[in-house]
Image (cartoon, grey):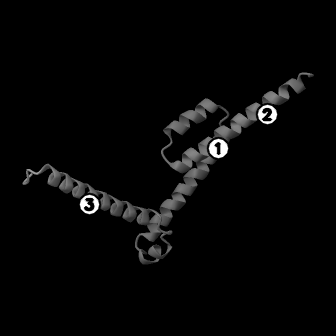
Amino acid sequence: EATLDLAERRRIRSAIRELQRQELERDEEALASKRFRPERGSHRQDDKENWPRSRCLEEDQQMALAALSRQLETITDVEELTKLLRAAGEYEERKLIRAAIRKLRAEEIEGEALSPCLRGG
């Protein structure tokens, strides 16, 4: 804003945009390097204070998923499974429910394919 020369203003704005672009690229590179780090195996050794708590949480989650899996085996209605899917919050829960829906649909399709044969076809 200090200069009235339009060409100089364009050069300044261009330089500012270039600096912003470079800063954005640096931020993206830093984020990518954090995102694709290897598992925190060595970090867990350093963080022994929180390790038992996180292991307990993992075990609780595994037990909850096993219970959900047993519950899903008893459900034979796709609509009921769909309601559960919409209510599920965790990725692993949704994954189990989707698998149960696929299994039920496959059984329905298989039953439809067999029923003409059973009717004497």
Query: Sequence-wise, which precedes: disc 1 or disc 3?
Result: 3
Q: Quadrant of the C terminus?
A: top right
Amino acid type indicated by mark 2: Glu
Quadrant of res 84: top right
Query: Sequence-wise, which precedes: disc 1 or disc 2?
Result: 1
Furthest residue to the right? 120
Task: Count residues near mark 2 (Cα–Cα under 10 Å), then give few for <14, some for 14-19, many for 20+.
Answer: few
Amino acid type indicated by mark 3: Leu
Residue in view at x 89 percent, y 26 percent: 117
User: Front-most of 83 and 68?
Assistant: 83
The residue pinned by badge 1 equals 99
Residue in view at x 79 percent, y 31 percent: 111
Element marked by disc 1: helix
Q: CA distance from mark 1 to mark 2?
A: 16 Å
Residue in view at x 41 percent, y 69 percent: 50
Q: Which mark is residue 110?
A: 2
Q: Which mark is residue 45?
A: none
**Residue 102 % position (x, y):** 67, 39
